[in-house]
Structure formats: C-alpha cells, structure tokens
Image: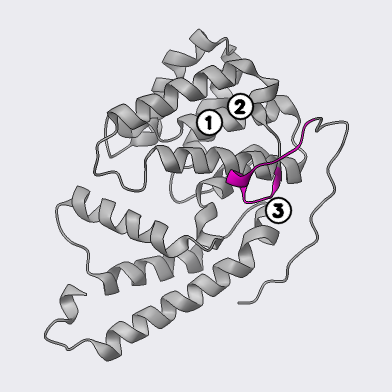
C-alpha cells in the first residue's frame, strides 16, 4: 500500500476569514473556531475542565487530551475542506462533546454523549437544529465508521487522525492499557498488534484532505506493525509468547 500524496486544495477566502498557524496544530493552517464564536470558548473551558475533573483515571486514551486533539483535527480539516463557519461550529462542538459519554459509562458512550449535549447546549445559546446536527455527528463516530455527509466524514477522520501520525505507537499503547484495565484482563501484545493491523487494513480516511495528510504515514505505521508481529513471533520463546 503506497498511496500518493495529493495536492491540498486552496482555501476559499470568502468562506474562511481567519487562519492561524498554531504549534498545537503542528504548523498546519486551521480555522480558529473560538475567535468566531465566543460561546465556543466558554463551552470548551467548561467541558475540558469537566473531563479533567470527572473522567475515570484509567481512561488513558479517551481523555481530555484526545478531545482537544480531535477538535484541533476538525479545525485543520475544515480549512482544507472549505467548510463555512456554521458547519464548522457544529462539527467542532460534536468533536468537543463526542466522548463525554465516558463520564457515565464505558459502553454505549456515543448515545450518552448525545443526551449530555442535548441537556447542556441550550445553555450556551445553541438552537435546536444545531443540537440535532451535533447529536448526529457524535453518533457518526460509532465504530465501525460509516459517515455520510462531509461533516460526518470530517469528524470521523479527526477522531482517528493518530493512525497516520508519528505518535501512532504511543497513542495505541495508551489505548491498549485502557482496554486492558477496563476489560479486567491483560491483552497480550501480539493479540493487540494483530487487532491494530486488522483495524488499520480495514480503515480508510474519508476526506481527500485526511488522505493527503495521513495516508503515507499510516502506511509506514502499518508496515511497522507487521514487523512488530513478526518480531514477537520469532524472538519470544513459545513458553512466554502468550503473555506478549
């Protein structure tokens, strides 16, 4: 698998009026949502504080850092996909709230996140139509991903942005630890990397922007996953292999 990098589309200057280069965004252009919608600043402050304070400590992956990461990815993809600001607002809000269901349960968290969004967003001035859109976008992140419209494709790609980044392996290890502790049994590393391999093979980015930004690195990460599985098979004694 060796996807070719596509040229990034030029921004529509009539649609995108503000562009930042933020170190958090690794130098990529993006739309600073909070400068256009002050209510988003207040919402972000309250939600991130809530996640930091209330999420179970054994959520090593689905935590406030992941939420911030997905919001940043949405802003970046919105720039390249030329979203108008109203579409960006609901997509960014869905990204901010998409894992709030973990405050209540590890399972069926997307539905719980929708209920939470419907409860709190009126207090931040969101209209019913916006809240319904946010809920639909949160549900689009349910695995396996089957997004329809462009906004759903953007949030799905943002949620799994790490698959095509240099921090893939440390991020995947955080998820491994989270799954192991929440399932009550340790997942052997060989089984884990086999799951990662199968997931990466079946996964695809849905937007052209994510494909251009992430496919090449994702292919390299997958090659290294294959190598890790082979190394475990050949270097670990059969007596101990089940623990790896």
In depth, the one of 229 and 235 nearer the eye is 235
Residue matched to label 3: 209
- Residue name at image x 45 percent, y 51 percent: 144
Residue 86: name its quadrant: top right
Residue 23 inside the magenta-drawn segment: yes
Question: Where the C terminus falls, by quadrant?
Answer: bottom left
Residue 40: name its quadrant: top right
Q: Secondary structure at mark 1?
A: helix
Total numbered badges shown on the rendered structure: 3
- Residue name at image x 53 percent, y 11 percent: 124
Q: Secondary structure at mark 2?
A: helix
Question: Where the N terminus falls, by quadrant?
Answer: bottom right
Relative placement, left or right, of 244 versus 158 is left
Q: Position of residue 118 (x, y in %)?
A: 45, 17
- Residue name at image x 83 percent, y 43 percent: 11
226 shown above or below 37? below
Relative placement, left or right, of 180 versus 157 is left
Label 3 vs label 1: CA separation?
Answer: 19 Å
Q: Earlier in the sequence, mark 3 or mark 1?
A: 1
User: Which coloring applies here?
Assistant: one colour
Q: Position of residue 107 (x, y in %)?
A: 29, 39
Residue matched to label 1: 94
Q: Callout 1 environment at 10 Å: few (<14), some (14 to 19), or many (20+)? A: many
Residue matched to label 2: 90
Q: The magenta stretch spans which residues?
A: 18-29
Q: Callout 3 environment at 10 Å: few (<14), some (14 to 19), or many (20+)? A: many
77 shown above or below 115? below
In depth, the one of 126 and 164 nearer the eye is 164
Label 1 vs label 2: CA separation?
Answer: 6 Å
- Asked whether the viewer can see residue 112, the reply is no
């Amino acid at each position: 698998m060796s996807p070719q990098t596509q040229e990034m589309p030029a921004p529509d200057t009539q649609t995108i009026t503000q562009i930042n280069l933020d170190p958090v965004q690794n130098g990529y252009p993006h739309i600073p949502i909070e400068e256009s919608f002050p209510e988003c600043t207040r919402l972000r402050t309250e939600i991130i504080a809530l996640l930091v304070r209330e999420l179970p400590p054994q959520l090593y992956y689905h935590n406030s850092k992941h939420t911030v990461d997905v919001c940043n990815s949405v802003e970046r993809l919105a720039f390249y996909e030329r979203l108008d600001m109203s579409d960006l607002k609901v997509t960014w809000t869905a990204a901010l709230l998409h894992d709030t269901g973990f405050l209540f349960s590890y399972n069926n968290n997307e539905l719980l996140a929708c209920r939470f969004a419907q409860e709190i967003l009126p207090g931040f001035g969101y209209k019913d139509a916006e809240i319904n859109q946010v809920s639909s976008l949160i549900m689009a992140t349910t695995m396996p991903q089957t997004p329809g419209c462009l906004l759903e494709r953007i949030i799905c790609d943002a949620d799994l942005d790490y698959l095509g980044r240099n921090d893939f392996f440390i991020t995947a290890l955080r998820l491994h630890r989270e799954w192991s502790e929440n399932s009550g049994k340790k997942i052997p590393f060989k089984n884990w990397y086999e799951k990662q391999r199968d997931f990466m093979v079946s996964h695809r980015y849905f937007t052209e922007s994510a494909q251009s930004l992430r496919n090449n690195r994702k292919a390299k990460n997958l090659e290294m996953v294959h190598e890790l599985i082979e190394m475990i098979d050949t270097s670990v004694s059969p007596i101990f292999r089940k623990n790896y």
